[in-house]
Every structure is written in C-alpha cells, then in structure tokens.
Image (cartoon, helix red, strand yellow):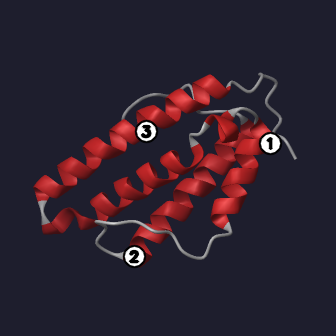
Amino acid sequence: MMGVSSKAWDGDLVRQWLENRIVAAGRDQVAAEMQGYEARDDYDKAAAEEWVCRAVKAPAYTADQAAFASRIKQLLGQDDYRATGIYDDRRFERHLRANLRKLARMGKDNTGFENTLHYQ
C-alpha cells in the first residue's frame, strides 16, 4: 500500500538523500574511531546506516516507490548481514534494522528525503 503523500516520487531526490547519508555516516565513523573504545556503539550505528543506504541506493530500487519498498522488505527478511570492521554484530544488526524501518516509513509516506542535514 502506498503512502498518503500527494507529491510524486522523485528517485533522483531519494538517491541524493542516500548519498548524503552515506557521506555523513562515513564522517560519523571516523569521528567514532577517533574517540576510541567508548564510541564503539556510535561506530556500529554509523556503519549500519551506511550499509543500508548503499544497499538501497541503486537506480533500480529508487526509480519508483514500489521498488524501493520491495527492496527494503527484502532486506528486512534477511537473516544475515555481512559487514567488516564492526565491533558488535548484534548491535550492528539492531541499528541496521532500525535504519531499514526508518527508510520504510519514509518511503511509504514519501517524506523526509528533502532533509539533508547531517544529523537527523
């Protein structure tokens, strides 16, 4: 079921938003690394956001709302998520699934993709 938003789906805007989030997540990972042991959760959170954005940013998935929703549903159905350099697999997966649910809501409602602020 599509959202109630009256504006048309803009795949270019969605891809740009995802690219911006990938850059922001990379910066967050660097900042967490510099903080050391205490910031491991922050690193895993940023790594999860980057992983999710990379997994859904292809034009085939962002071209239309239904394809975007289908890709997110497919990812949520996975049992295992491969990633290197993370500190805690369970924490990473928890953050990853939270990011997928956030994107699912945004995609369903077609809202939030215009927000390009670093911190959201």
Give the mark nearest the N terminus, 2 or 1: 1
Give the mark nearest the N terminus, 3 or 2: 3
Dot 3: what SS? Answer: helix
Q: Residue at x 40, y 41 (%)?
A: 22
Give the image location of residue 1, x and y in percent.
88, 47
What amino acid is at disc 3? Arg
Residue 108 appears left or right of 11? right
Q: Residue at x 59, y 51 (%)?
A: 102
Q: CA distance from mark 3 to mark 2?
A: 21 Å
Give the image location of residue 16, x and y in percent.
51, 27
Above or below residue 63? Residue 33 is below
Rendered image: mark on residue 23: none
Rendered image: mark on residue 21: 3
Above or below residue 14? Residue 81 is below
Rendered image: mark on residue 66: 1
What amino acid is at disc 1? Ala
Q: Which residue position holds label 2? A: 89
Q: Residues within 10 Å of mark 2 (few under 14, many from 20)?
A: some
Q: Residues within 10 Å of mark 3 (few under 14, many from 20)?
A: many
Give the image location of residue 3, x and y in percent.
81, 39
